[in-house]
Image: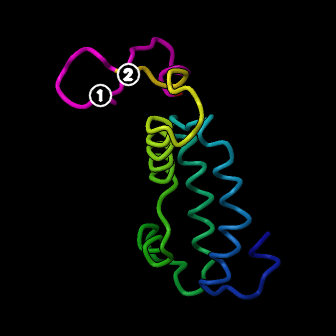
Amino acid sequence: MIKRDFIDRSKATILALYKSLIRPHLEYCIQVWNLYLAKDIKLIEGVQRRATKLVHGIENWKYDDRLKFLGLTRLDKRRIRNDLVKTFKILNGFYNINKGLFFDLDDGGRRGHEKKLLKRRFRLDTRKFF
């Protein structure tokens, strides 16, 4: 749709359109439905791959080079970073929610700090990747 409706293919125009129209759809509720299947990750990343090809002059570059030129990161890296930021904020009390709902702290007297998380083992993938 962007390719068909917009004539200007400059870096600034495509980045503004991508960040305002496309990326919010790709990252909608990403905290809830974390992608773990390779086919789903490849499908979502393909949208960003096609969007970076819209910029005039860099259509034939490699994907990583296009991302570096545009100042973007891969979507899987953004998801990991956002998960880490949310975990940090929940554990340090930036949100007014009970951290026991989301995390089990490892208070086994082991070395380290008091905010070490306990990783439980799960049989089903739905709970494992939640």
Answer above or below: position of 8 versus 60: below
The reply to whether discs 1 and 2 touch (Cβ–Cβ < 8 Å) is yes
Residues rendered magenta in the picture: 106-129
Residue 104, given in percent of the width and then of the height, sits at 42, 20
Residue 110 on image: x %, y %: 19, 20
**Residue occupying the point 82% across, 78% down:** 5
Q: Residue at x 47, y 70 (%)?
A: 67
Which residue position is annotated with label 1? 114
The quarter holding residue 95 reads top right
Give left or right: position of 16 versus 67: right
Looking at the rendered structure, the secondary structure element under dot 2 is loop
Q: Residue lying at the far right in this picture: please name it.
A: 5
Q: Nearer the viewer, residue 96 or 24?
A: 96
Secondary structure of residue under mark 1? loop
Which residue extends farthest left? 111
Q: Looking at the image, is 99 positioned above or below residue 7?
A: above
